[in-house]
């Protein structure tokens, strides 16, 4: 558990790399525009031979990632940019002729893209058309970088190897590289992902089946688990809870630091290692890829419900952009895809109220399922006489004579109410469903929220 500033190495890094940023040329390709694709999903094919990996989003919502290509007898990594305005893909080479696969990807506060060069034991920064590489190991050192995360302009690096594993912090402005070596009992860990929140470095320990945290001020590591299976990728919600995917066990897991508890949610009964990438949106909904099932999943923490969305490929990494669209990497045809949740999920915040509807998006004739709704008071005052009305298309019917118009009375500021209807699909089709919530604010004016969402019924 030691923190080792290596000033001599940092000085050498400066001599070798800092004064020699390389200008790199980008090959540019035109791709399909989103207006040509329907139903909230569109796929951007990457140039033939390239395999995208580890997505990052810049302030303009452009998508960045590593792109790996088999050349000769080895994988060679490039940096790929998808411009969401011009619908073009640019691919940048790196100065090192043998970087190996590009794994991690992140954007710093200045808009620079950082990636890990696995075989070259380097991290690289692309700023405009200037690429700069920094050594974080050597061929003699079995550690190689697999994850990179920007905390402002500090760059945190997770490394994987067979012994004496470590996390590093590289500070470009000071040209310092600091090592935080894992405790001996966890020295053979395999770090797969890292995230920073409030100064704490969180990471997945895939080999040892733990969620780990590092306090850089004390150099202390803490491990939480053991987990049921191998944690791969993680993200952190607004409450500080650490969510992660457990690929081999079909589990979505969460560690709650406030309660020191781990909760695991079982996803399906297929026995396939499906959950992979993970990202959390502005509403604290958890999005994750189910790569072997060709689905993107969403877990609603408030409603405690799962919703799955079919996509055209086996998705791997997922990330949200700045307007809460979900981007993913599609394997097989190797593309970058986008899922626009507004076409599938009813969610609207209007005058004092927020309404969220959660249900299956695709069902079959005769299938029974539930629709859950959360009504939340987002005003700063109490709302009275709140009435919620559900309107279903003719192909869907509420069972057991449940009322579709419910008065839930009064909600104080920040409070919510959950309603549930049991529904049966009676005929095939694509049906739009609507829900409205109305109430009264203390000054007598109206509070309201109205939403609509689609349910598709197949024979």
Image (cartoon, rainbow, N blue to C red):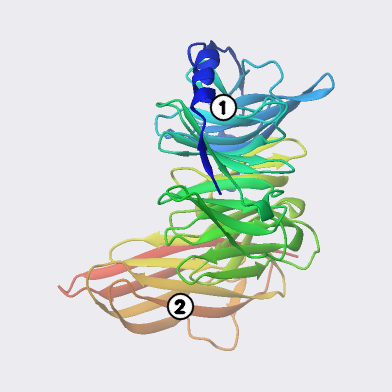
Dividing the picture into quadrants, the one containing residue 144 is top right
- What separation in Å lies between label 2 and label 1 (alpha carbons)? 42 Å
* Residue 170 against residue 432 in the figure, above or below: above
Describe the element under mark 1 as helix, strand or loop.
Answer: strand
Going by the image, does 118 lie left or right of 258? right
Instruction: State the residue position of label 2.
Output: 418
Across and down, in percent, residue 73 comes to 84, 22
- Mark nearest the camera among 2 and 1 is 1
Q: Earlier in the sequence, mark 2 or mark 1?
A: 1
Dividing the picture into quadrants, the one containing residue 268 is bottom right
Q: Residue furthest right?
A: 73
Q: Which residue is drawn at 26% across and 67% down?
A: 379
Q: Which of 297 and 125 is in front in this view?
A: 125
Label 1 Cα crowd, 10 Å radius (few <14 / some 14-19 / many 20+):
many
Across and down, in percent, residue 454 comes to 56, 60
Which quarter shows the C terminus? bottom right
Describe the element under mark 2 as helix, strand or loop.
Answer: strand
Is residue 310 visible to the viewer in this orientation of the structure? no
Q: Which of 1 and 201 is in front in this view?
A: 1
* Residue 410 against residue 69 in the figure, above or below: below
* Residue 269 against residue 424 in the figure, above or below: above
Q: Residue at x 73, y 27 (%)?
A: 140
Say which mark, if any, is on residue 65. none
Across and down, in percent, residue 11 comes to 49, 20
Q: Do the residues labelled 2 and 1 touch (CB within 8 Å)?
A: no
* Residue 290 against residue 382 in the figure, above or below: above
Instruction: State the residue position of label 1.
Output: 81
Q: Residue at x 31, y 68 (%)?
A: 448
Across and down, in percent, residue 370 comes to 59, 76
Is residue 7 visible to the viewer in this orientation of the structure? yes
Label 2 Cα crowd, 10 Å radius (few <14 / some 14-19 / many 20+):
some
């Amino acid at each position: 558990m030691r923190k080792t500033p290596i000033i001599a190495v940092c000085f050498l890094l400066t001599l070798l790399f800092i004064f020699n940023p390389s200008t790199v040329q980008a090959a540019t390709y035109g791709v399909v525009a989103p207006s040509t694709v329907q139903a909230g999903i569109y796929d951007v094919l990457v140039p033939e031979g390239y395999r995208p990996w580890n997505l990052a989003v810049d302030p303009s919502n452009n998508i960045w990632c590593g792109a790996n290509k088999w050349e000769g007898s080895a994988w060679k990594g490039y940096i790929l940019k998808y411009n969401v305005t011009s619908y073009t893909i640019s691919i940048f080479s790196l100065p090192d002729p043998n970087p190996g696969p590009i794994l991690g990807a992140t954007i710093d506060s200045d808009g620079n893209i950082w990636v890990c060069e696995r075989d070259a034991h380097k991290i690289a920064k692309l700023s405009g058309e200037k690429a700069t590489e920094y050594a974080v190991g050597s061929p003699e050192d079995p550690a190689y970088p697999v994850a990179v995360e920007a905390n402002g302009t500090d760059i945190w690096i997770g490394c994987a190897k067979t012994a004496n594993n470590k996390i590093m912090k590289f500070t470009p402005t000071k040209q310092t590289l600091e090592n935080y070596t894992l405790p001996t009992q966890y020295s053979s860990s395999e770090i797969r992902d890292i995230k920073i929140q409030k100064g704490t470095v969180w990471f997945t320990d895939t080999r040892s089946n733990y969620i780990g945290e590092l306090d850089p001020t004390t150099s202390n590591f803490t491990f939480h688990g053991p987990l049921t299976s191998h944690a791969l990728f993680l993200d952190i919600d607004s409450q500080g809870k650490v969510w992660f995917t457990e690929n081999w066990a079909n589990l979505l897991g969460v560690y709650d630091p406030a309660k020191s508890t781990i909760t695991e949610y079982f996803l399906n009964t297929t026995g396939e290692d499906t959950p992979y990438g993970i990202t959390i949106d502005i509403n604290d909904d958890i999005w994750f890829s189910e790569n072997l099932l060709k689905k993107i999943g969403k877990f609603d923490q408030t409603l405690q419900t799962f919703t799955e969305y079919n996509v055209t490929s086996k998705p791997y990494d997922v990330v949200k952009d700045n307007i809460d669209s979900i981007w993913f990497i599609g394997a097989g045809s190797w593309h970058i895809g986008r899922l626009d949740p507004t076409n599938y999920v009813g969610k609207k915040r209007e005058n004092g109220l927020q309404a969220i509807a959660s249900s299956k998006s695709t069902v079959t004739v005769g299938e029974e399922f539930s629709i859950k709704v959360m009504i939340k008071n987002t005003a700063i005052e109490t709302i009275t006489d709140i009435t919620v009305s559900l309107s279903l298309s003719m192909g869907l019917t509420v069972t057991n004579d449940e009322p579709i118009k419910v008065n839930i009375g009064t909600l104080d500021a920040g409070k919510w109410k959950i309603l549930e209807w049991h529904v049966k699909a009676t005929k095939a089709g694509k049906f739009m469903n609507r829900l409205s919530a109305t109430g009264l604010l203390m000054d007598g004016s109206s509070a309201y929220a109205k939403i609509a969402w689609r349910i598709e019924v197949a024979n």
